[in-house]
Structures are given as structure tokens and as C-alpha cells.
Image (cartoon, rainbow, N blue to C red):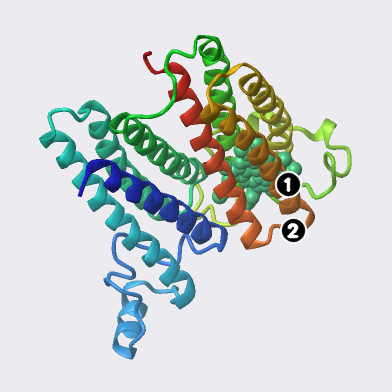
Amino acid sequence: MQLPSLLKITIIFTFCVILMGAYTRLSDAGLGCPDWPGCYGMMKVPSQDHELTQVQNNFPGHEVEPKKAWLEMIHRYIAGALGLLVLLIFILCLRNNEAPKKLPTIIALLIVFQAALGMWTVTMKLMPIVVMSHLIGGFSLVSLLLLLYLRTKPLRIPGGDAIARKLAPLALTCLGVLILQIMIGGWTSSNYAALACTALPICEGDWYNNLKLTQAFNPFQEVHDTYEFGVLDYASRMTIHVVHRFWAIVTAGMLFWLAFKLYKQSQSSVLKRSAVLLVLLVCLQVGLGISNVVLHLPLGIAVSHNAGAAFLLLNLVFINYALWRKA
Ligand code: HEM
């Protein structure tokens, strides 16, 4: 198989793994299997009588919840398959003289680190900094795979679009702003702060005088037996939620500005289409965020909000690639 085709398949597959991860996390199934890499020490979810007896002996106090355990195991198996695809890409790039070498090496190292984060997510009982890093790891992986795909494929983007090129620093700033918003979103979700604030447009009560920025964003929280369902007090969760909403306004504003400038100034139809897509994705993402709040976090909307963030990121990575690549 040709490298670009393999990369295309791997990008779609990575997207599925990210969504499956979000579905697992948001269904509170992250601890469906309390150990790693097996599930209660087995390669499948224990269901037979003798297996359940073994669970009682080896994991006293634990009760197997088959649905949650299967979600977690399916996520691990498909993540393992993704690891094999990345290894194949790495080998193909090493063998192909014209293919880049540094980027596939970084991607291969990243997936190993991502597997370690997956393990720590379980062994450290959903510690928010680990859960958020695991989410960012997945987003970074799909972005780097897209970059590698773009580098291995001749693109019909005029690298010499001098006017549009002037927008490159703005596009990079927007990328930074979006990444920060995604991190705050991951922090909101991993600290179970989604329902800490259910009023619109801001928060119920005297939210302004109850902001606790230092506690809310301390990456190293006190040690707890488990972080499932969150350990922060109400004010800290509310603070995280409010910051995610405020930064969403900054993000949306910046991305609209970039889209407007790009649409007006670029000569390239590909970049003009990316600008329109950017506007649509921002509207969709903000709409999904508001629906999360109004509808009290239905699973489908929460997972779509995760997918929306990934699409936004990929679109912005593409725009940056097009604007920064050498003419
Ligand atoms: C550009 C805008 C936005 C981006 C890129 C973004 C991104 C994200 C991301 C990546 C997550 C983590 C999802 C996960 O854990 O799977 C998240 C969570 C969340 N976002 Fe946003 N978001 C945006 C705007 C908004 C807005 C405007 C609202 C509400 C008014 C909102 C409400 C939420 C809530 C409530 C969660 C927690 C969901 C949960 O616990 O599952 N977001 N966001």
C-alpha cells in the first residue's frame, strides 16, 4: 500500500480511537477495568463463574460492570491496532528515501507515550492532569499524522500566495489559542465541571466573587484514592467551567477574524473553502457547547463536542501548513 493511502486510513482510524476514548471517558467507563493492560488480569472481560470467582479473590471489593469493562477493553484493543498502523508508517518512511524521517519518529514516540498515559489514566484512578494529557496526546497524534500526510502528498495549494502568507503569524496564534481552549475543555471534563454551571450566558449565583483560579487550575491536586466524579469543590469547578466559556469567546472571535481575512485575501480556492469551513465548525462547536449546558450533558452531544474540537484543530493545522510551507 502507498504511504499516503495508509496515512489517510490511519488518520480516520485515529479519529475513531479518539471518539471511542471520549465515549468511554464520558460514559464514566474509564475505570471499567481497574488494572492494565488486562481487565481484572484477563485479556477479555471476565464473565464465566470461575472468572468471576477469580476477580473476587484478586480484586476484593470490585464488581465487574460488563458494559463499562467492554467499552474500556474495546478502546484498548483499537488503540493497540492504531499502534501497529503507526509502526507500519514508521517502517515505510524509514525505507522510503524520499519520505520524511523526523516526523514519523516523533509520531512513533508519541504513540508510545500515549499508551503510557492510557495506563496511568487507569492506575492513577483518573487523575485529571493525566486524563487531560491523554486527550491532548490523541489530538496531537491525529494532527501530526495529518501533517505527515500533507508532506507526503503534492497539494494544490499555491505556496507562493504572498498576500495570504502574511496571515501565517495570525494563523499560528489562532492555533495556540485553540489548543489552550481544548486543554481547558479537557480540564472541564476531567474535573467533572460540566454541570457546575447550568445558567446562560454565564453562571448562576454570585459566580464572580466565588472564582478560585489558583485552586481550579492547580495541575497537581491532592492525592486521592480515586478522582472519578471529581475531587474539587463547587467553586473551583465553577471557575473551570466559566474560564472555558470565556476562552471560547476569545477563540471564536480569533477564528472568525482569521477566517474573514483568509477568505478576503487568499487567491486559493482551497484556502477560501477552509475559511468557510472554519466559520461553520466554530458555530457548530459553540452550539454543541451550549447544548451540553442546556441539555445537561447528553452523551451524544458531549462526544460530538469532542469531535468538533478535533475537526477544528485539523482544519487549523491544515491552514497553518498551507500558509507556512515553503513556496
Ligand atoms: C471553540 C470553542 C470550543 C472548543 C474548541 C471546545 C472544546 C472542548 C473540549 C476539547 C472539551 C473536552 C471534551 C472531552 O472531554 O471529550 C470540552 C468540554 C466541554 N465544553 Fe467546550 N469547547 C468550546 C466551546 C464551548 C462552549 C461555548 C461551551 C458552553 C457554553 C462549552 C462547554 C463545554 C462543557 C460543558 C464541557 C465538558 C463536557 C464534559 O464533561 O463531557 N464549550 N470543550
Kindly identify the residue that appears in the image at 78 percent across and 47 percent down. Answer: 197
Residue type (three-letter) at the residue carrying disc 1: Gly
| Residue 286 visible in image | yes
- Looking at the rendered structure, the number of numbered marks drawn on it comes to 2
Kindly identify the residue that appears in the image at 80 percent across and 35 percent down. Answer: 210
Question: Which quadrant holds residue 265?
Answer: top right
Residue with the most extreme right position: 205
Vertical placement of 19 versus 107: above or below? below
Identify the element where label 1 is drawn. Answer: helix
Q: Residue 287 — which label? A: 1
Kindly identify the residue that appears in the image at 55 percent across and 10 percent down. Answer: 163
Q: Is mark 1 within 8 Å of ligand 1?
A: no
Residue 266: image location, x then y, percent: 57, 19
**Left or right: where 225 falls relative to 238:** left
Along the line of sight, which residue is nearer the eye, 130 or 2? 2
Give the mark nearer the N terminus: 2 vs 1: 1
Along the line of sight, which residue is nearer the eye, 165 or 113? 165
Kindly identify the residue that appears in the image at 48 percent across and 23 percent down. Answer: 320
Residue carrying label 2 = 296
Residue type (three-letter) at the residue carrying disc 2: His
**Left or right: where 145 falls relative to 231:** left
Residue 81: image location, x then y, percent: 28, 57
Along the line of sight, which residue is nearer the eye, 132 or 86? 86
Identify the element where label 2 is drawn. Answer: loop
**Left or right: where 205 falls relative to 134:** right
Q: In which quarter of the image is ligand 1?
A: top right
Vertical placement of 264 versus 51: above or below? above
Residue 44: image location, x then y, percent: 31, 74
Kindly indicate whether the residue at mark 1 contacts the one at mark 2 (C-beta within 8 angstroms): no
